[in-house]
Image: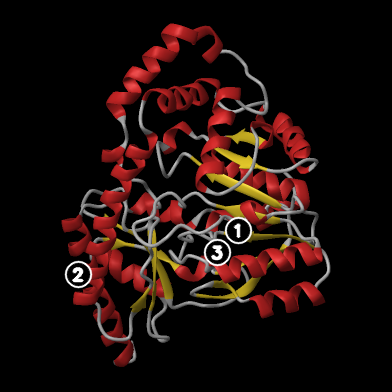
Amino acid sequence: MVRFASRMSQMKASEIREILKITARPEVISFAGGLPAPEVFPVEEMKIVSAAVLDEIGGEALQYSTTEGYDPLRAQIAARMNARAGTSVTPDNILVTTGSQQALDFCGKLFLDEGDRVLCESPTYLAAISAFRAYQPRLMGVPTDEDGMIPDALEQILRTTNAVKFIYVIPDFQNPTGRTWSLERRRALMALAETYGVPVVEDNPYGELRFEGEALPSLKSMDTKGLVIYVSTFSKTFCPGLRIGWLAADQPIFRNFVLIKQGADLHTSSISQREISRFLDLYDYDANIAKITTVYHKRRDAMIAAMDMYFPEGVSHTRPQGGLFLWATLPSYIKSVELLKHCLAHNVAFVPGDAFFPDSTVTNTLRLNYSNMPEDRIAEGIKRMAAAIREYSNQSLRGF
C-alpha cells in the first residue's frame, strides 16, 4: 500500500481550477478564474523580443542561470518597486520566482512547522491558503472590514496567541474582495508587527492596476525592521504564461529564501526572465499597464452597472478601485455553493466565497472576475446570474 506524507491530508483540489474545467465550454460565461484578458497581451511585441533574445544571447538564455535571478531584471524590478511602491530595495533584495505562487509556497516552507499560526484577512486569497496549508499550520482569520484588518482584533490575537509565524495580507485590490486598505490601517498593522516582531507577507499582484483614487504606500515602504516580505508578479500586468514573479526581503530572510529556491528548482526560466527584461528595455511598460487598466476599468463599470440593474434587492457588492475582482454578499438564506449549481444550469459561473475564509463558515458570498469578459458578455452573464438567484430564492421560499 502506498503511504503518502501526512501533509497530503491538508491538500485539496483548487475549487477555482475545478470550476474552470466546467467553464471551458464556450457557452458558459465565466466570472470564476482570475484570468487576465488575452487580447491585451503584447503578442507582436513579444515576437520581436523573443527573436532579439535568441539572436543576441540565445546560448545564455537557454542555459542554466543563477538562483537569485537575471541581474538586469532584478535591477529593473527594484527600480519599479522603489518608484511605485515607495520602497528602498536594491537588486540584492530581489529573488525572481516561478510566479508569485512559488513565493507564497516558499514563505510557508521557511516559517511554518505543524501547528504554527498564520494570521490573514477574512476572507483571503484561496491559493495562499492552499500554499500555506501544505505545511500544516493553523490559519486564523482576523476580522476585516472595508478598510482592512481591524487593529484591535489583530492586537488581541497577537497578545493572546502563541506561535504566530507571520501575517499574510493583500492591501491593494484584495483577492477576493477587491478592497484596498486605508493608510491608517497600513500604519496600524506595521506598528503591531514591529511591536510583536512578527513578519508580514505583503502580496501585491494587482497594485499597478488602479482605475481611480490615489495610490497608497506599500507596507514594505513603512518597514523599519526588515519584517516585510513583499511578493509580486508579472502575471497580472504582463503575461501570466511566462510565470515570472518575485519576492523582496531584507537579509537574513533573503538568504534563506535563496537556499529554498536552490532546493526547489535551482532557478526560474532563464529565457522568460531575459524576455521580460528586454521588453522593459524596448517598450513602454507603463503604457502597456495603462492599456490594461483602461480595459479593466470599463469591464468593472459594466459589471457594477449590470448588477445594479439586474440583481434583486438584498445582494450587495464591493466597488473596487482597481484589480480584477469584486465581492458580492447574498441574503443569508442563499448558499453560494448551491447557487452555483443553478448558475451553471444558466451557463454562467463564479467562485463561491466559502473557500476564501480560512476558519469560518460564511456561506453566502461569492467572487466575480471582470477582467476576462467583454462588456456585452458581462452584462449577459450578470443577467443570467440574476435569473438563477431569483430561481433559487423562489425554490427556497417554497421549501424545496
Whether the residues at callouts 2 and 1 have beta carbons within 8 Å, the answer is no
Can you identify the residue that label 3 sits on? 124
- Residue 192 seen: yes
- Between the C-alphas of marks 2 and 1, the distance is 32 Å
Closer-to-camera residue (196/66)? 196
Can you identify the residue that label 2 sits on? 383
Of label 2 and label 1, which has the lower sequence position?
1
Left or right of residue 349, residue 237 in this image: right
For label 3, the crowd category at 10 Å Cα-Cα, with few meaning under 14, some 14 to 19 and many 20 or more, is many
Closer-to-camera residue (300/186)? 186
Whether the residues at callouts 3 and 2 have beta carbons within 8 Å, the answer is no
Whether the residues at callouts 3 and 1 have beta carbons within 8 Å, the answer is yes
- Between the C-alphas of marks 3 and 2, the distance is 27 Å
Residue at figure coordinates x 54%, y 49% from the top left: 85
Residue 337, image x, y percentages: 42, 71
Residue type at mark 1 is Ile
Q: Quadrant of residue 382?
A: bottom left
Q: Quadrant of residue 335?
A: bottom left
Q: What SS does tag 2 mark?
A: helix
Where 1 falls versus 149 (above or below)? above
Closer-to-camera residue (110/201)? 201
Q: What SS does tag 3 mark?
A: loop
Residue 367, image x, y percentages: 40, 65
Q: Which mark is residue 129?
A: 1
Residue type at mark 3 is Thr
